[in-house]
Amino acid sequence: MSEKQLLRKLFDKNRDDAHDPRERPVSDEKEPLVVGLQLDLQQIIDVKWKDYHFAWEPLKYNNVTRLILPHTDVWTPDILLYNSVDQKIDSKLPTNVIASYDGNMTWIPPGIYQSSCEIMISLFPFDTQNCKLKFGIWTYHGQLVDLRFSDCNTTTCAAATSEFSTNGEWTLISESPSFHICQQQTYFNYRIRAGSLGT
């Protein structure tokens, strides 16, 4: 079988478990869908989840192990930056979704995120600012979609900084994600220190 036949099978509306992009992709509706979020300080967000509709045996389909699908054809989480100061609330570019044979879905929508940050200037220009990027799922509550930071272990959990560009105005001191259950939001906390004048 070919990729074309696989796509026909996966999107066959006559199947009992047919995929519907309006449906939260869980086999048990009582369980939350876990969505992973990874923030790269170059404004790249990786979003990952598992969709049981998109699982197949590669050997049956000419060793096809992944498909590139339009984001409008599959369920995608509506993750937003809650404390955005951008007029366009959702600044993500609507890109394709990668579906893997094991049901793992990956969506990497690039965007430029502008958030509010309360600035304390008592020690200007050598002060340290604590800021938050408040991400959350817009329409689902935490019992239906569980937004988590990806690539976390029991002791460390951080945003990717390998592509982060420093500048003379401020320095990234630390960053750490956290989850606030009461608001069902995932926060990315970061601290910056202003540089000296003239640098």
Image (cartoon, rainbow, N blue to C red):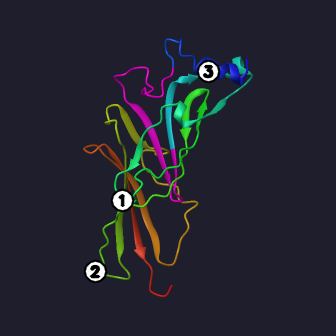
- Magenta stretch holds residue 20: yes
Q: Residue at x 50, y 30 (%)?
A: 50
Write down the residue under mark 3.
Answer: 56
The residue tagged with tag 1: helix, strand or loop?
A: strand
Look at the picture and state if 119 lies above or below 53.
below
Q: Which residue is mark 1?
A: 132
Start-end of magenta stretch: 19-46
Instruction: Locate residue 108, reporting x and y percent.
Output: 55, 45
- Tell which circle, 3 or 2, labels the residue nearer the N-terminal end: 3
Disc assigned to residue 122: 2
- Sequence-wise, which precedes: disc 1 or disc 3? 3
Indicate the amino acid at tag 1.
Lys
Alpha carbon separation for disc pair 2 and 1? 20 Å
Secondary structure state at the residue bearing disc 3: loop
Q: Residue furthest front?
A: 87
* Neighbourhood count class around disc 2 (C-alpha, 10 Å): few under 14, some 14–19, many 20 upward: few
**For residue 169, above or below residue 157:** below
Residue farthest along the bottom direction in this orientation: 198
Q: Residues within 10 Å of mark 3 (few under 14, many from 20)?
A: some
Q: Amino acid at mark 2?
A: Ser
State the residue at coordinates (48%, 32%): 75
Q: CA distance from mark 1 to mark 3?
A: 40 Å
Position in image of residue 53 (x %, y %): 52, 22
